């Protein structure tokens, strides 16, 4: 029995290989701190946290609270321009440092079981690309004297 290499590696390298920056590249976007500890938190404010380029499949979104908000109640939705709570609803902005939350396949609008993610598509032409941003919306803000500090991550695949 012979081993026949069709992977794009070995002696036939390059035939089926996906280039490093080509389609199929998966990566984690984000991780920088969003520091609202000195900001006045207003209910319904939208913070655009991660720019999503066109032709990107976002598979999941994650948030880590680094510093809890100070005050009575702060809930945050994580979504995008098309669905404000599309990735997560009612994340607790007053959770203790180190608290982690994430989108749930089959539950959240942008992470449905049918496709395990959301495709931020090109509008059909190269001239009209559509990107978006992963946003955090302050849905309930009651007597917040200092906002939270948090990090948002998205697990993405480049489909260009």
Image: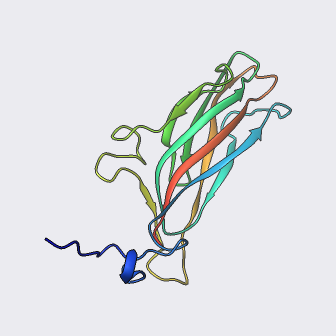
Answer with the quarter of the image where residue 107 lies.
Answer: top left
Counting from the top left corner in percent of width and height, residue 37 is at 82, 30
23 w.r.t. 65: above or below:
below
Q: How many numbered discs, if any?
A: 0
70 w.r.t. 51: above or below:
above
102 w.r.t. 3: above or below:
above
Give the residue at x 72% y 23%: 68
Q: Is residue 81 left or right of residue 45?
A: left
Closer to the camera, 150 or 108? 150
Counting from the top left corner in percent of width and height, residue 128 is at 54, 79
Extreme residue in the right direction? 38
Give the residue at x 43% y 55%: 118
Answer with the quarter of the image where residue 18 lies.
Answer: bottom left
Q: Is residue 121 left or right of residue 7?
A: right
Extreme residue in the front direction? 1
Counting from the top left corner in percent of width and height, residue 45 is at 69, 41
Q: Is residue 118 left or right of residue 80?
A: left
Q: Is residue 8 left or right of residue 19?
A: left
Counting from the top left corner in percent of width and height, residue 59 is at 44, 51
Closer to the camera, 43 or 111? 111
156 w.r.t. 3: above or below:
above
Give the residue at x 29% y 76%: 6
* Display colour scheme: rainbow
């Amino acid at each position: 029995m012979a081993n026949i290499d069709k992977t794009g590696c070995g002696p036939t390298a390059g035939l089926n290989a996906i280039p490093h920056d080509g389609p199929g590249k998966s990566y984690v976007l984000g991780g920088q701190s969003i520091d609202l500890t000195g900001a006045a938190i207003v209910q319904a404010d939208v913070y655009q946290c991660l720019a999503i380029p066109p032709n990107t499949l976002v598979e999941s979104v994650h948030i880590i609270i680094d510093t809890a908000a100070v005050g009575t109640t702060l809930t945050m939705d994580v979504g995008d321009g098309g669905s404000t709570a599309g990735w997560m609803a009612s994340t607790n902005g007053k959770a203790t440092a180190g608290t982690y939350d994430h989108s749930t396949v089959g539950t959240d609008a942008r992470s449905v079981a049918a496709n395990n993610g959301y495709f931020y598509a090109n509008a059909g032409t190269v001239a009209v690309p559509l990107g978006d941003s992963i946003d955090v919306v302050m849905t309930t803000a009651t007597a917040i004297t200092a906002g939270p500090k948090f990090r948002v991550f998205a697990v993405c695949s480049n489909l260009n």
